[in-house]
Amino acid sequence: MTTKQENPRQPLSHLDWLESEAIYILREVAGQCSNPVLLFSGGKDSLCILRLAEKAFRPGRFPFPLMHIDTGHNYKEVIDFRDQRAAELGERLIVRNVEDSMKRGTVVLKSADESRNKHQSVTLLEAIEEFGFDCCIGGARRDEEKARAKERIMSFRDEFGQWDPKNQRPELWSLYNARSHKGENIRAFPISNWTEMDVWQYIERENLQLPSIYFAHQRDVVMRGGSIVPVNVPLVNGEVANPVKAGEEIINMQVRFRTVGDISCTAPVISDADDVSKIVLETATSTITERGATRLDDQTSDASMEQRKKEGYF
Amino acid sequence: MSSNHTQTIDSQHTASLLRFMTCGSVDDGKSTLIGRLLFDTKTILADTLTQMTRTSEKRGLTAVDLSLLTDGLQAEREQGITIDVAYRYFSTGTRKYIIADAPGHEQYTRNMVTAASTANLAIILIDARKGVLTQTRRHSYLAHLVGIPHIVVAVNKMDLVNYDQAVYEKICADYLVFANEIGLAQSQISAGNDISFIPMSALNGDMLVDRLDNMPWYAGDTMIEMLEAAPSAHTEHNEPFRFPVQFVCRPHASDNPELHDFRGFMGRIESGEITVGDAVTVLPNGYQSKVKAIQIGNAQLQSATTEQSITLLLEDEIDTSRGDMIVKTSEAQAPVKQIDAFVCWLSETPMSPARTYVIRHTTRESKAKVGTIHYKVDVNTLEEQATTDLKMNDIARITFKLAQPLMVDSYNSNRATGAFIVIDESSNNTVGAGMII
C-alpha cells in the first residue's frame, strides 16, 4: 500500500459534510428551479431542513415558501409548533388541507376512520398545480425504507406526480439535474444521505427546538394489533381523534414519538428519553427501525412505500 | 452471525465520512459482504431481519437471503436482479460510511460509473475459485476511469479454496499483471493512490470485521481496518481554489441599512482553500477583487476549505451570477470553448452527432455540439474501436464544441471541475457523463 501524504488536510466531520452537502442541494434548487416550495410538517427532519435553509440563504429570505399538507389528523402540539417556527423565521407558510380535497370530492375515504395519510398525495398534487410549483423540497432519507434507498437527490415526477423508478435520471458527482417541463415536478431531498442518528446528532449540535411529543411524556394508549395506539387525541379543530373502542383498555404510559405524522399511522414507543442527548443514546441502542416500529402504513407489504411513491406520495 | 446491538456513538460529532462502492455480481458474494458489514455494525435491526426471514421463507429458502437487503424495488424483486444503484449507510462510531451498491453486469456500465462518481474507495470482488475474470477487468477499468483513489481487491470465498495462500497469491499476481497492462497500477501510484489486496470469506466473516483463525498467513489489515484507515478526502494533494457560484444573495432589506449593499456569493468550495484577504478573479469575465469575508450562516470564518458550503463577500462590487467561478488570481485557468473528454453514454436513446446538447459543468451550462468522436473503448478488452455513434453504456473519447466558455481542469487533476453531464433538452434527461482529458 503506497500512500503519499503531502500536506494532509483535516477532513470535515461527518455532520459538517452532511450539512454542507444539504446546503449545496438547497442552493441548487434555488439556482435551477423557478418556483420551488419547501414541505414543512413541524417534524424533526423538516426542522433540520429549516436550519439548513437558514445557513444556506441568510441574511436573505428563503427563495421559497413553506408548505404543509395537513390531514387534519395531526397532533396539536406539532401544528402549534409548525406555526410558531414559521413565524419566528418570518417566512411564508402555506397550509393546504386534505379535508378541502374531501369537500371537493377529489379525496374519497373508504370509511370515516380510514387513514388520511396516503390521501395527502392528492392534496399535494392539487397544491402543486394551484401554485405552479416546479420543485418540492422534502425531508425523506434513504435509510428510512428500502424503496427510498434508490431514490435520487433530485427525483423526477411526471405530470401526474408519479415516480417511475425505471425512468429516473442518472445522478453523477454533484451535478444534479433539476430541469423540468411545465407541469412536471422535481422532488428534492437535501438530507437523503442522513440517517436517523445523524438527524438527532444534528439536532443536538444545533440545539434545535422540537415539538414536545418527541420527548418522553405520559399518554393514554391502547394496544391494537401489536402496536401502541394513542387514543382520544385532541385535534386543533376541537374534535378527538382515535376514540377508544369498546372493550379496549386504556393504559397511561410513558412514551415518545420517533416519527411524527398523521395520527392514524404514527405510533409512539415506550421511552423515558426526555431530552435530546437521551434520545441520541436511545437511537444508538434501538433494535427496531424508525419506520418499522412506528409507521403503521409501511407494514402492509414489502412494497407499500414504493406503491405510494408511484402514486405521487412523497 | 452475532451482533451486540450497540452502536457506538460519537459524542464529539467528529467522525469523518467515507463514500465507497462495491463492484461485483451477486455471485461474487457482494450482497453477503454488504449484509455482513451492515449486520456487524448493527445497521440491520430486528424488524428488518424478521421481514427478510419472512420473505426468504416465502420464496422457499432455508437461510435468510442477505441480498434481500440490497434489492429495493418491486420490479427487481420480481426479476431477482438489481437494476439500479442503491445507497446504504453504516457507522462504526469513528466513521460514517455511505456504500454505493452498483449491479455488476456488463449492461450496467452506466450504473457503475454513477456509483463510482462519488466514491473514494472501491472494493473489487473476485471469486477465489474463478480468479481474474473479464468483469474484474471491466470493474477495474471503470474505477480507474472515474478516478477512484483507493482500490481494494477482495479475493472472496477463500473458504471454498481451503484458505489456500497460493491461490490468493496467484490471483494477486494475475491482477497486478493486468493492472500494469491498463496503466492502472502506474497511475494509481503516481497519483499517490493505492491498490490493496485482501483475502476473505464474506459468508464466514473471515477478515471482514474479525480476523478469525483460518488465514494466519495473512498479516495485512482486515476489511474494516482498511475502510477505517482510508483517507476520506478525494485527494491528499493541494488543489487550486475553485468556487463555482451557485446563488447570489442580495437581500435588499430596506429596514436594515447594513444589508442594503450586501452581495454574497454562495456556493461550495470544490477544491482548495480560501482565506480572507486573498486576491481572487471571477471567471469567465476576469474581474479581480479580494475576499472581504467568509460566512456559513451567521458564523464568520477566517478561512475555509474543500467541500464547505460558504458565502463569499468581495471587497468590490462585481457583477457576478450563477455559473461564474471564483478562483485565486494566482491560479486562474483560461476559459475554453472546446473540450476533449471520455464520455459514458447513459441514455437508451443513442447519441446523435448531429444534435445540439447541453453540457452542465459545475453550476454552469453551455450548448454543445459533437466535434469528433475519436474512438470508443471496449470495456472488456479495453480496445479502442472506430465509431460514429454512441449507445447506452458505451464509453468514447469525444471532442465537443461549446457555445459558452467553461472553466475546466483535467479530470485527473480535479474531479469537480473536470466532470460534466450531458443533458438532452427535449426530455431534460441526463444522457451522458464526461471526464475532461
Image: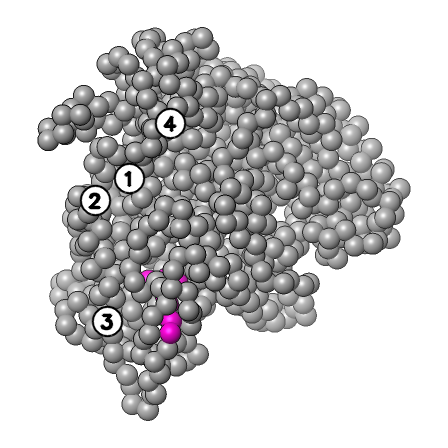
| Residue that numbered label 3 is attached to | A109
Left or right? Give the position of A221 relative to B15.
Answer: left
Q: Quadrant of residue B219?
A: top right
| Residue that numbered label 1 is attached to | A54
What percent of the width, then of the height, locates residue B340?
Answer: 51, 16
Identify the amino acid type marked 2: Leu
Check residue A259 for magenta coloring.
yes
Q: Chain of mark 3?
A: A
Q: CA distance from mark 2 to mark 1?
A: 9 Å
Task: Residue at 33% x, 74% y: name it.
Answer: A218
Q: Is residue B163 above or below residue A281?
A: above
Identify the amino acid type marked 1: Glu
What percent of the width, then of the height, locates residue B242?
Answer: 43, 20
Check residue B29 for magenta coloring.
no
User: Mark 2 and mark 3 in contact (Cβ < 8 Å)?
Assistant: no
| Residue that numbered label 4 is attached to | B301
Quick one: SS at disc 2?
A: helix
What percent of the width, then of the height, locates residue B84?
Answer: 52, 46
| Residue that numbered label 2 is attached to | A89
What's the magenta region?
Answer: A254-261
Left or right? Give the position of B79 relative to B426.
Answer: right
* Same-chain status of marks 2 and 1: yes
Residue A97 visible in the displayed image: yes
Q: CA distance from mark 3 to mark 2?
A: 36 Å
